Image (cartoon, grey):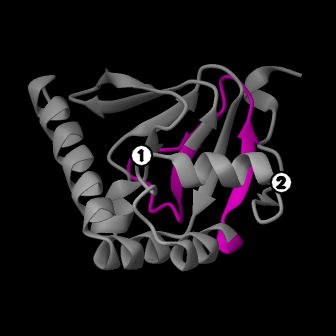
Amino acid sequence: MLASDRMASDPTEVWGDLATSAFVRSSHLFKSLDEEACQDLLKLAQVQTYAAGETLVSEGSAGEDFFLVRDGTAALSAERGGRALELGHLERGGFFGEERVLGGGMHPATVVALTEVAVVRFSPPMVAALADRFPKVGQLLQAVAAARRKELAARGG
């Protein structure tokens, strides 16, 4: 079986997974949450693993989730004018899907696993509610989205 023929693992609950819960709590994005909000987030989060070469999200797709990279490395790329533009890599603690959280738009880039990648998946409405309630979360999401748009524009997008 080729890596591209593999399928992502079935999502599993984060609640009860102490290592993943600790990782989410310590992430730069969510460390400003109070205990109640963090528990609510963890109760709804899921972990999923993707094989190297597997696409996590495709550019232009509506997508349903916001992702926090727990393990592994993934590449971000976008197609402009018939050519692929590499936008960077995501590693432990990196996230994507912020456009879905901020405005419900389509994914502006494709994300492909370079190594086996484990992500924690969250519902965009849940993360949006947290961004409204905890300004540091919203500010970080806005800053990352703006930086990624700027990077895409600088590379010819």
SS for callout 2: loop
Taking the spot 27% from the left edge, 61% from the top edge, the residue there is: 136
> Magenta span has 56?
yes
Q: Where is residue 79 in the image (x, y as percent from the top left)?
A: 31, 31
Q: Residue at x 75, y 45 (%)?
A: 19
State the residue position of label 2: 10
Left or right of residue 147: residue 51: right
**Among the two numbered marks 1 and 2 on one chain, the one whose residue lies closer to the N terminus:** 2
Task: Examine the rendering and report whether any part of residue 105 can be seen.
Answer: no
Residue furthest to the right = 1
Let me know if residue 83 appears in the view.
yes
- Whether residue 139 is situated above or below residue 90 in the rendered picture: below
Q: Is residue 48 above or below residue 83?
A: below
Which residue lies most toward the front here? 35
The disc placed on residue 28 is: 1
Vertical placement of residue 124 versus 113, above or below: below
Say left or right for 136 vs 28: left
Q: Where is residue 71 in the image (x, y as percent from the top left)?
A: 65, 31
Q: Residues within 10 Å of mark 2 (few under 14, many from 20)?
A: few
**Residue 100 position in % (x across, y down):** 38, 63
Q: What element carries label 1?
A: loop
To which quarter of the image does residue 134 belong? bottom left
On the rendered image, what quadrant is the N terminus found in?
A: top right
Q: Give the range drawn in magenta.
A: 43-68
Residue 124 within the magenta-colored segment of the rendering: no
Residue at 10% x, 26% y is 154
Label 1 vs label 2: CA separation?
Answer: 26 Å
- Say what amino acid the circle numbered 1 marks: His
The kind of residue on which mark 2 rests is: Asp
